[in-house]
Amino acid sequence: MTRTNRASLLALLSFYLASWSNVTADHHGESDAFTLEEIITGDHRSAENIARNSARRPVETLAFFGLEPDMTLIEIGPSGAWYTEILAPYMRDHGRYYGAHFSPNTTNAFQRRNLENFEAKLSSNPELYGKAIIRSLHPPAETAIGPEEGADIALTFRNVHNWMARGLDQEFFDAFYANLRPGGILGVVEHRAPDSASRQNMIDSGYVSEAHVKSVAKSAGFEFIASSEVNANTRDSKDHPEGVWTLPPNYRMGDTDRSKYTAIGESDRMALKFRKPI
């Protein structure tokens, strides 16, 4: 082989090696993104939180709402971050995650402590949560919980009864509407009461009727799209001494009839999907 041919062969080999390196590098970058199935049992989650996957069914729930990893998402009322542990890593590489939490201006000691714990959790693992954005939600004063152009989807889990107790359920839904783009989706998971339940009964028990959620969402301007039984629990009679907090994971009755409530499991829940009209 001549020196010229050898040089040409080396140049060609270098080209192919460089091309292969670029392909594998790109593939590796894609593989760094997490699937929901990987996230829900990830090392960053406690054994206790992982154990609740079977009751809360996050993969199926998020599929029903239509969440995709390249969306802009607002998680409304993330509280102790059970769903944040799933949502923030899932949106990390291709989407945007906004957590609409309690206001730092609150005078409520529980809310302030809850927010501080949430902030500490996110800052403790910047690899997973470093791109998450925390916003304050305290209607009617603080409602800018998403990007100016509007989010693609807003999700809330087991929070409506708390807003009702504060007399602000309509104001909260109005804020969700304002922060979604036209065509954006609102997903609501909530403990489910019979439609005949009174407002005070819903506040006292923690169970909210589907009719009430649909009414408040409609008043805010949303269109109802669909419901799902993905979080249904037919064992839940909804007539417990301490309301929904009687059941796991709260067990407000302590050891009294604990095995009974463990057998029932977590509450019967609705999953409702709404859309902001285009």
Image: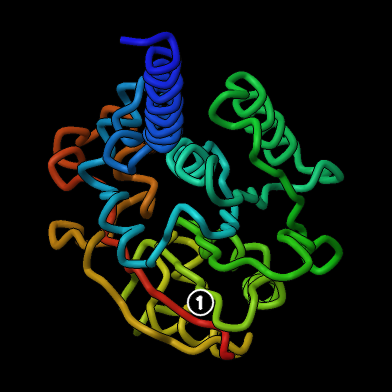
Camera-side residue: 200 or 187?
187
Q: Is residue 266 left or right of residue 107?
A: left
Q: Quadrant of residue 40?
A: top left
Q: Is residue 33 visible?
A: no
Location of the N terminus by quadrant is: top left
Q: In this view, does 209 lie above or below 17?
A: below
Q: Is residue 125 left or right of residue 210?
A: right
Expressed as whole percent of the image width and height from the top left, the position of residue 83 reads 45, 43
Q: Is residue 2 left or right of residue 59?
A: right
Name the residue beneath numbered marker 1: 199
Label 1: few (<14), some or many (≥20) within 10 Å? some
- The residue depicted at 82 percent of the width and 45 percent of the height is 106
Outermost residue to the front? 2
SS at circle 1? helix
- The residue depicted at 45 percent of the width and 68 percent of the height is 187
Camera-side residue: 115 or 84?
84
Location of the C terminus by quadrant is: bottom right
Expressed as whole percent of the image width and height from the top left, the position of residue 23 reads 40, 34
Q: Can residue 96 be seen in this view?
A: yes
Q: What amino acid is at disc 1?
A: Arg
- The residue depicted at 70 percent of the width and 44 percent of the height is 133
- The residue depicted at 71 percent of the width and 47 percent of the height is 102
Q: Is residue 259 above or below residue 90?
A: above
Expressed as whole percent of the image width and height from the top left, the position of residue 71 reads 53, 59
Camera-side residue: 132 or 272?
132
Expressed as whole percent of the image width and height from the top left, the position of residue 200 reads 51, 72
Q: How many labels does the image show?
A: 1
Q: Is residue 246 left or right of residue 101?
A: left
